[in-house]
Image (cartoon, helix red, strand yellow):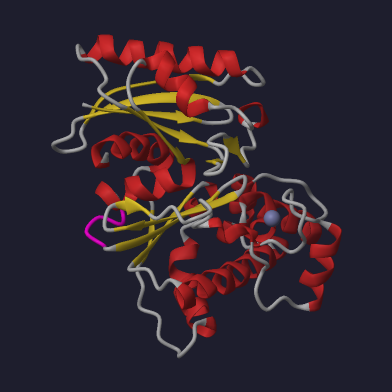
Amino acid sequence: MLFGIDLGGTKTEVVVLDPKDGHERFRSRVPTVKGSYADTLSTIRALVAQAELACACRAQAVGVAIPGTISKKSGRIKNANSSWLNGQDLLNDLQRTLRCPVLLENDANCFALSEAMDGAGQGKAVVWGLILGTGSGTGIIQEGKVLEGLNSLSGEWGHNPLPWMDAYEQELSRIQPCFCGRQGCIETFVSGTGFEAEYQRQSGRQLNGQQIAQRLAAGEVAALRTFDLYLDRLARSIACCVNFLDPDVIVLGGGMSNFDGLYQALPARILNYVFGGEFDTPLRKAVHGDSSGVRGAAFLTNAA
Ligand SMILES: [Zn+2]
């Protein structure tokens, strides 16, 4: 059995998959106790114990999807927005707690791995998975393995600057710097948060993505303008990755992936920006939705 944990900012989830077909044998989720590292460890231990009991088997290894990454220099967590994890020796602490090998991986990489194994990227050699949610994480899977990178930075596309910015976007990047400390990061434009901020600028109203989607369907001018700007920014940003990586499939996840209009409109826009004027890459919605992170974590143990 494959045991996976998704250590999210709001919920912590366990899943047990059958290694033969990826069929789900058990799943449970609990709210994440924010701010306490000790509680993080005890929550994971309790979830794994619950799963072991339910499946009547002992975990041989546990894969864990984490926000942020492990520093290759220190072995400790860095870049996690669940800030109580940063600087912690999570790998060794979990291995001691669970008494089995543990594999930690960035949550966007787990998302991409899940979709590559038995989701929208199944059968493709190079899968680029993008989560367009509160932030914008991406992961690259090559032949069923996460492409880590020497600095554990592969897929950190969201912290490159938005390509071909116009004067309005340059001004925005000055007044809304990214949390990473730089200006004009792709994430600040193409995340769901960036989309909602643009709608607020266009309309003067603060609404969530779902509410904006309803206004878009009703043909509201501010929503149409916001979506048009969003499409163009996302197309430019994706085109840069296509020019560099040229993946075999692009899989979208996170809240923005639920805008069905993306899949019709984006390919023609991307074509405007790729080098050489040819773009045939399939652009697909994630099959496993917000379960991809925990499923990908479980698949880490399969590859181990
Ligand atoms: Zn940034």
Residue situated in front as seen by the camera: 104 or 165: 104
Query: Percent position (x, y) of residue 78?
Result: 61, 39
Q: Is residue 262 within the magenta segment?
A: no
Magenta stretch: dominant secondary structure: loop
Q: Quadrant of residue 175?
A: bottom right
Query: Percent position (x, y) of residue 237?
Result: 57, 69
User: Eyeballing the image, is 182 above or below 114?
Assistant: below
Q: Horizontal placement of 15 versus 194: left or right?
A: left
User: Eyeballing the image, is 102 above or below 242?
Assistant: above
Q: Horizontal placement of 256 versus 302: left or right?
A: right
At a point 55% along the width and 38% down the height, the residue shown is 67
Residue situated in front as seen by the camera: 15 or 81: 81
Residue 264 visible at all: yes
Residue 287 visible at all: no
Furthest-front residue in this view: 73
Q: Horizontal placement of 1 versus 85: left or right?
A: left
- Magenta segment, which residues? 120-124
Furthest-left residue in this view: 20
Residue situated in front as seen by the camera: 166 or 37: 37
User: Eyeballing the image, is 134 above or below 126?
Assistant: above
Q: Quadrant of residue 58?
A: top left
Query: Percent position (x, y) of residue 19?
Result: 18, 34
Which quadrant is the C terminus positioned in?
top left
